[in-house]
């Protein structure tokens, strides 16, 4: 399957693995790239640019296919060493960067000069158009269903993707709620040129996280996520658990006066305890509604091959029959 996204990134299948904190290590990125998609290392999970440079080297030992790095621009006061991370990306020979969070404009000249293609993750048409206008090469359009930060507009992909298609000239992928061949065909039908998946890739053999995390996703239904931190305008979709219930209760009780410090126990520094140790109630962790469509833990290659086979069979079988004379 050839699309503007496969051409842009030099990949076989139009499937991207989105950056995921404490999940997007070299093992997963390499597995996705080896299976013909675009694997992505999560930059900020590596605490320093030196550690990111090392992670890029590790990934390169595991694959000779293109892979990328996610750089999330956080609205924090004490900023990570972004110039250092950009240098590690460029020196590491990376040609694809997924940016997310704040506007990446400041970093585009250096990245483009080094031949890096930039795909910016956006949760609205407005931000997608901005990304296009500052020179991003592609956009990842993240609908309200998505795991992680869906923004504050709450527009689901059935509306957001065709709206993006109507307005954008640069190619975009559908992100949020994508799981299988049906998702890919639907994304293409709505105007996207591929899809980005987060939660689905966590429930794979190669995802370097504790088995409890994979089993929690398999066990969850589409009703089991919650939105937290809305009043802080930092909305996050997470899997429900006892810490999340505590957090939601605090939000209800404190209302508009809620401060980040009030929920620090439930959200700060919890990822290693969940992803590495498998302590599932340690805090709030991102998970998409798509959990309801995830019932197994295949290898990444099995997953991607299955998606592509299903997508091709839907297009040339079921859909073709609807228009056959
Ligand atoms: C556990 C987890 C951690 C994530 N961490 C990040 C992150 O650090 N940076 C980022 O840009 N997106 C992050 N995301 C969002 C994903 O890259 C992707 O956009 C999202 O998962 C798509 O929705 P889906 O889960 O329905 O596939 C995370 C998602 C999950 C599930």
Image (spheres, rainbow, N blue to C red):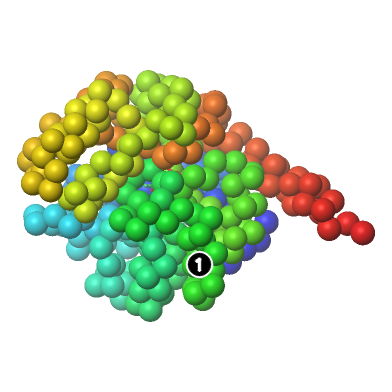
Rendering quadrant holding ligand 1? top left
Task: From the top left corner, tell me how far across and down residue 50 is, in percent.
Answer: 21, 49
Count of picture labels: 1
Q: Which residue: 29% across, 45% down?
A: 236
Q: Looking at the image, is 141 positioned above or below residue 169? A: above
Q: For residue 83, what is the image quadrant? A: bottom left
Q: Which residue: 84% across, 58% down?
A: 323
Answer yes or no: is residue 202 visible.
Answer: yes
Q: Secondary structure at mark 1?
A: helix
Q: Quadrant of the C terminus?
A: bottom right
- Residue at the extreme bottom: 133
Front-lying residue, 157 or 115:
157
Task: From the top left corner, tell me how far across and down residue 107 is, in percent.
Answer: 27, 69
Instruction: Name the side, left or right, on which 191 lies relative to 134.
Output: right
Task: From the top left corner, tell me how far across and down residue 9 is, in percent.
Answer: 51, 61
Q: Looking at the image, is 259 positioned above or below residue 247? A: below
For label 1, the residue is: 163
């Amino acid at each position: 399957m050839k699309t503007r996204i496969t051409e842009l990134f030099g990949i076989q299948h139009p499937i991207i693995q989105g950056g995921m904190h404490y999940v997007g290590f070299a093992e997963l990125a390499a597995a996705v790239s080896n299976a013909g998609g675009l694997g992505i290392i999560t930059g900020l999970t590596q605490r320093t640019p030196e550690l990111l440079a090392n992670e890029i080297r590790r990934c390169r030992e595991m694959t000779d296919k293109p892979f990328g790095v996610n750089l999330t621009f956080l609205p924090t006061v004490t900023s990570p060493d972004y110039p250092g991370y950009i240098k590690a990306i460029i020196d590491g020979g990376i040609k694809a960067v997924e940016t997310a969070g704040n506007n990446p404009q400041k970093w585009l000249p250096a990245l483009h000069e080094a031949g890096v293609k930039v795909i910016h993750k956006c949760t609205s048409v407005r931000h997608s158009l901005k990304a296009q206008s500052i020179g991003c090469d592609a956009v990842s359009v993240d609908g309200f269903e998505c795991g992680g930060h869906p923004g504050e507009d709450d527009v689901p992909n059935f509306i957001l993707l065709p709206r993006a298609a109507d307005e954008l000239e640069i190619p975009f992928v559908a992100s949020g709620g994508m799981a299988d061949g049906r998702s890919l065909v639907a994304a293409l039908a709505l105007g996207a040129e591929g899809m980005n998946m987060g939660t689905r890739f966590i429930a794979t053999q190669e995802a370097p996280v504790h088995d409890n995390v994979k089993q929690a996703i398999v066990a969850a239904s589409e009703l089991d996520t919650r939105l937290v931190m809305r009043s802080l305008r930092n909305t996050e979709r997470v899997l429900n658990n006892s810490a999340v219930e505590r957090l939601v209760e605090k939000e209800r009780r404190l209302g508009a006066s809620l401060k980040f410090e009030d929920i620090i126990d439930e959200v700060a520094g919890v990822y290693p305890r969940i992803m590495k140790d498998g302590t599932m109630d340690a805090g709030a962790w991102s998970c998409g509604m798509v959990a309801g469509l995830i019932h197994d833990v295949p290898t990444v290659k099995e997953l991607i091959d299955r998606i592509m086979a299903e997508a091709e069979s839907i297009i040339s079988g079921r859909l073709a029959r609807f228009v056959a004379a």
